[in-house]
Image: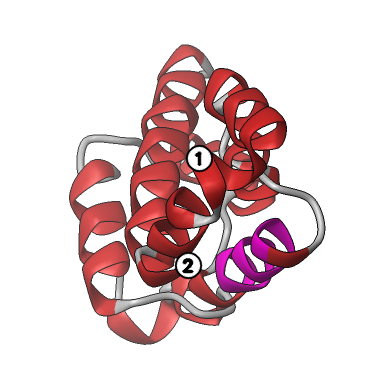
Amino acid sequence: MEPFQNPYMGLPGITPEELNFIQQATVGLTENQQKYFYMSYTTKRKSEQDMLIFCIIGTFLVPGLQRFIVGQVGMGLLYLFTGGLCLIGSIVDLVNHKTLASDYNKKMAYEAFQIAKMSN
């Protein structure tokens, strides 16, 4: 892909690290498979700003919301019933919201890659 034709540059809040990871993940895909990857990945990913908002809401209104959003239902329930592990876990998530978003996006990129590989 040409740098000026890179569709991932238009994703809101994309970081250089995420862009680099996606480009490396899609190297072996055909053009059709890259389209499937793009469609699947863009609907699932979370930007760092979105994750920050989820963490703020999870800290002050609904403990564990950020964990439910990233698919960690067990941790979400634990946070919900313990008040965000007495607010300490929620504050840690608030500080580490970028890592939560990055880990989630890598997981979604892997899933999107698997879906794209199955398509022909």
Above-or-below relation of 71 to 96: above
Magenta region includes residue 54: yes
Q: Main secondary structure of the magenta part?
A: helix
As drawn, the residue found furthest toward the top would be 118
Can you identify the residue that label 2 sits on?
Answer: 94
Can you identify the residue that label 1 sits on?
Answer: 37
Front position in the image: 45 or 76: 76
In the rendered image, residue 32, in percent from the top left (x then y), is placed at: 51, 38
In the rendered image, residue 92, in percent from the top left (x then y), is placed at: 38, 59
Relative side of 16 to 103, left or right: left
Residue type pointed to by label 2: Leu
* Marking on residue 47: none
Q: Secondary structure at mark 2?
A: helix
- Stretch of the chain drawn in magenta: 50-59
Front position in the image: 81 or 98: 81
Residue for point 51% across, 41% down: 85
Residue for point 61% across, 54% down: 42
Q: CA distance from mark 2 to mark 1?
A: 30 Å
Residue for point 47% across, 67% down: 94
Other residues around mark 1 within 10 Å, as few (<14) / some (14–19) / many (≥20): many
Q: Upstream in the sequence, badge 2 or badge 1?
A: 1
Front position in the image: 107 or 31: 107
Residue type pointed to by label 1: Phe
Magenta region includes residue 21: no
Q: Secondary structure at mark 1?
A: helix
Above-or-below relation of 83 to 94: above
Relative side of 28 to 111, left or right: left
